[in-house]
Image (cartoon, rainbow, N blue to C red):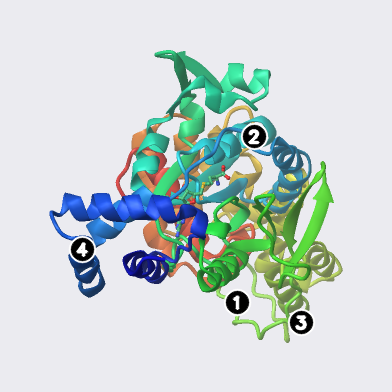
Amino acid sequence: MPPDLHRLRALLADRLGMTFDEKRDDLLSEVLRTRAERHRMTERDYLDRLTADPDRAELRALAEAVTINETYFFRNIEQFHALGEVVLPDRIRARASVKALRLLSVGCSSGEEPYTLAAVTAERVPPDWHVSIVGLDINRAVLRRAAAGRYGTWSLRETPASIRQRWFHPRDGGVEVDERLRARVQFVEHNVVNDDPVLWAHRSYDVIFCRNMLMYLTDEVRRGTIARITRALAPGGYLFLGHTDSLGPRPEGLQVRHTHGTFYYHREDQAAPARPIVPPTVKTPAATPQIKIKPMQGYDRALALLRVERFQEALAAVESMTEPESRLPRVRVLRGALLAHAGDTGRAAELCERLVEDDGLNADAHYVIGVCHEGDASPATATRHHQLAAYLDPGFAMPRMRLGLLAKQAGDRQTAARELDRAVTLLRGETDERILLFGGGFGRQPLIALCRSELQAVGAVT
Ligand SMILES: C[S@@+](CC[C@H](N)C(=O)[O-])C[C@H]1O[C@@H](n2cnc3c(N)ncnc32)[C@H](O)[C@@H]1O
């Protein structure tokens, strides 16, 4: 191999984490020639400069020139069947109390994969849920095409006719992606070599697609990317790889699943050993009669179970409590939150309504009632309870988030932007206990990221 080509390869591996086999020598030679020419340099001088001062713009231009961006809608359609019929129903059960799902497409290229995720979720997830899909790629040029949302009809060669009719509109001889799908997807320029604490927040995503990209990465970057992806998956979340990508027979923390003639991975629900529990911070309102219980064994145990996402057991622990502990406001709120999480919104609302009769100032109870009414035909009751919760406790982030999401759904962008922005600020200081009780399994960072992506979707700059 010519020495200059060898240096270019080393640079691409070092700076961009990319590797290329000999079959791509012609491409790399051509890229080296054109980039050097562009800077009016010899190839050697160009490489010297790039080695000494790898400026961002040039690295970006190189990434755009060397990446392979082949993709199309519903590529490997059996994976989307598995997504629609196994994965989404499972995640819908897991997120019942927040009614929100987050998906990530790593190496999304010109957007066909994240828009396919948007179409499948639009078909499978109830309409009052909030679905946020992030597509990331190193190549800014393809991301611009993705954001435009326009494609030639050849991109739809594997797309089922019914989906095509519903979600794609003829435009200038090609198609345009429906506005409702576009509102679910955000595109981010990002190289997987780099960390980003928000994008890769732990336990953040319900589903991650990372297909046909790992083979272009060096071994070290590939290992780092897989570890990051695994951490970013929610416990119980799912990972889809391309057919030629493999994690080996025993990937750490992931179980292989086979359905629909394809395979994918499921992050194990880690029943981590219960950590010591931070003393509860939910206020006991003055109007509620004080009941002295010590120690709070039952409550602490239920909270510990909730922390490791053993929802059923947490609910059983709360339901087995007897008076007077079971009468405590925070126990009743916890029970309501767990029932809502299990999808039993009727009992959850009833329980918290009784609590509100005893103590009208309990912000948490109003919040749970609000969540339970979100699926109603008219969300006015939900809005009223969330407003009350936010009024009673101005530091309470979750009702702000719900008010923002409800306003976005109703098309009120201004209110949505205001409430979501407030939620982002308040979430930073929200108590761990409330995040645990009301976050539906999302942690603080994923909730902030969720609000941010919704803010972007309503056109507010974040
Ligand atoms: C072949 S496409 C795959 C597109 C889509 N996932 C699919 O399977 O249809 C691979 C994509 O990975 C992106 N990519 C390659 N290296 C990357 C990196 N280090 N960070 C982020 N994206 C990268 C490329 O720009 C390209 O768009």
Residue 169 at x, y = what percent?
49, 16
Q: Which residue corresponds to mark 3?
A: 297
Separation of disc 3 and disc 2 at Cα?
A: 44 Å
Mark 3 vs 1: CB contact within 8 A: no
Q: Which residue corresponds to mark 2?
A: 120
The amino acid type of the residue labelled 1 equals Pro
State the residue in front, 172 or 182.
172
- Residue occupying image coordinates x 69% and y 81%: 292
The amino acid type of the residue labelled 2 equals Val
Separation of disc 4 and disc 1 at Cα?
A: 61 Å
Mark 2 vs 1: CB contact within 8 A: no
Tell me: residue 357, above or below residue 43.
Answer: above
Q: Which residue corresponds to mark 4?
A: 46
Numbered disc in front, either 3 or 2: 2
Upstream in sequence: badge 3 or badge 2: 2
Does label 2 point to a residue whose CB lies under 8 Å from ligand 1?
no
Which mark is on residue 280? 1
Separation of disc 2 and disc 4 at Cα?
A: 46 Å
Q: Quadrant of residue 312?
A: bottom right
The amino acid type of the residue labelled 4 equals Tyr
Tell me: residue 72, above or below residue 263.
Answer: above
Separation of disc 4 and disc 3 at Cα?
A: 68 Å
Separation of disc 2 and disc 1 at Cα?
A: 40 Å
Dot 2 alpha-carbon crowd within 10 angstroms: few under 14, some 14 to 19, many 20 or more: some
Numbered disc in front, either 4 or 1: 4
Q: Secondary structure at mark 1?
A: loop
Dot 4 alpha-carbon crowd within 10 angstroms: few under 14, some 14 to 19, many 20 or more: some
Numbered disc in front, either 4 or 3: 4
State whether residue 108 appears in this view: yes
Upstream in sequence: badge 4 or badge 3: 4
Separation of disc 3 and disc 1 at Cα?
A: 12 Å
Dot 3 alpha-carbon crowd within 10 angstroms: few under 14, some 14 to 19, many 20 or more: few
